Image (spheres, coloured by chain):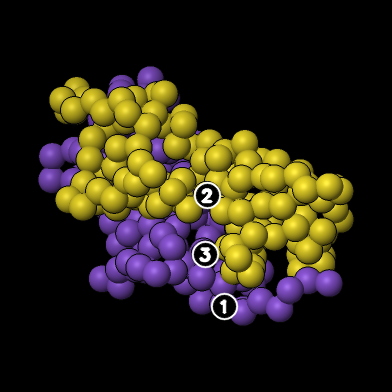
Chain colours: A purple, B yellow
Amino acid sequence: MAASLPLVDTCCSPLTEGALDDAAASTLAAKFKALADPARVRLVSIIAAADGGEACVCDLTEPLGLSQPTVSHHMKLLAAAGLVAREQRGRWAYYRVVQDELTSLAGVLRSGAAPSVNNG
Amino acid sequence: MAASLPLVDTCCSPLTEGALDDAAASTLAAKFKALADPARVRLVSIIAAADGGEACVCDLTEPLGLSQPTVSHHMKLLAAAGLVAREQRGRWAYYRVVQDELTSLAGVLRSGAAPSVNNG
């Protein structure tokens, strides 16, 4: 009944280029899930817009109006998905956006005709 | 305490070009949430890979091994997010991917230097 479909099993193949297998779909879904929350979307945008592309966790609570444990929880999820990198300096953690990961995710969403996966 | 950040309030501005306000972040997060599930990621990839870029809901149950009500539930969420378009023909619903929406979402993830928002 189902049409015969090409199977694509790499993580970063364009979403629209061939039917993804379960493992590839799960990898992608986990990254989209990290961005499936308004606070986390804002955190990524704030960090990316910060001076030097880097922000101290201590500067992220005020713009979001969230407690530091809540911000730290969101940052942990973003880091686990590979979308931000964390560096501890003394008392504070500093974060920067992993643009290669976002670019790779963007490549997945673009049509197969022009994949723009960035392998750094 | 917080650094002064440019506010960007349109829905499809690149995520990394300026701090997003709450409304823009919520709009984006809702679209990412639609893709935050392996079954929905697979459904999008299967529909995009189907002949003519279109698939009958009746052909989507077998490749996923899910019941038709479950597939219909997932398709409803994807359609609500604007990522797929639905057309009823007789007994069956047919779906196609809204590539402009995916391309627009991809543009959001790319660095501000090269926004690729498609206003179709």
Label 2, residues with CA under 10 Å away: few <14, some 14-19, many ≥20: some
Q: Nearer the viewer, residue A68 or B117?
A: B117
Query: Is disc 1 in contact with disc 2, using a CB cutoff of under 8 Å?
Result: no
Residue A64's image quarter? top left
Mark 1 / mark 3, whichever is N-terminal: 1
Label 1, residues with CA under 10 Å away: few <14, some 14-19, many ≥20: some
**SS for dot 3:** loop
The dot on residue A16 is 3
| Residue linked to disc 1 | A9
Q: Amino acid at mark 2?
A: Val
- Between circles 1 and 2, the one closer to the viewer is 2
Label 3, residues with CA under 10 Å away: few <14, some 14-19, many ≥20: many
Q: Is residue A86 visible in the rendered structure shown here?
A: no
| Residue linked to disc 2 | B98
Specify the quadrant that holds the N terminus of chain B.
top left
Q: Is residue A47 left or right of residue A23?
A: left
On screen, residue B32 above or below B62: above
> Where residue A61 appears, x then y in whole percent?
34, 27
The disc numbered 2 marks a residue on which chain? B
> Where residue B10 appears, x then y in whole percent?
32, 29
State the CA–CA distance, disc 2 to disc 3.
11 Å
Q: Residue at x 73, y 74 (%)?
A: A3
On screen, residue A96 above or below B9: below
Q: Are marks 2 and 3 on the same chain?
A: no
Residue B15's image quarter? top left
- Between circles 1 and 3, the one closer to the viewer is 3
> Where residue A80 appears, x then y in whole percent?
46, 55
Q: Residue at x 39, y 29 (%)?
A: B24
State the CA–CA distance, disc 1 to disc 2.
23 Å
State the CA–CA distance, disc 1 to disc 3.
13 Å
Q: Residue at x 78, y 71 (%)?
A: A2
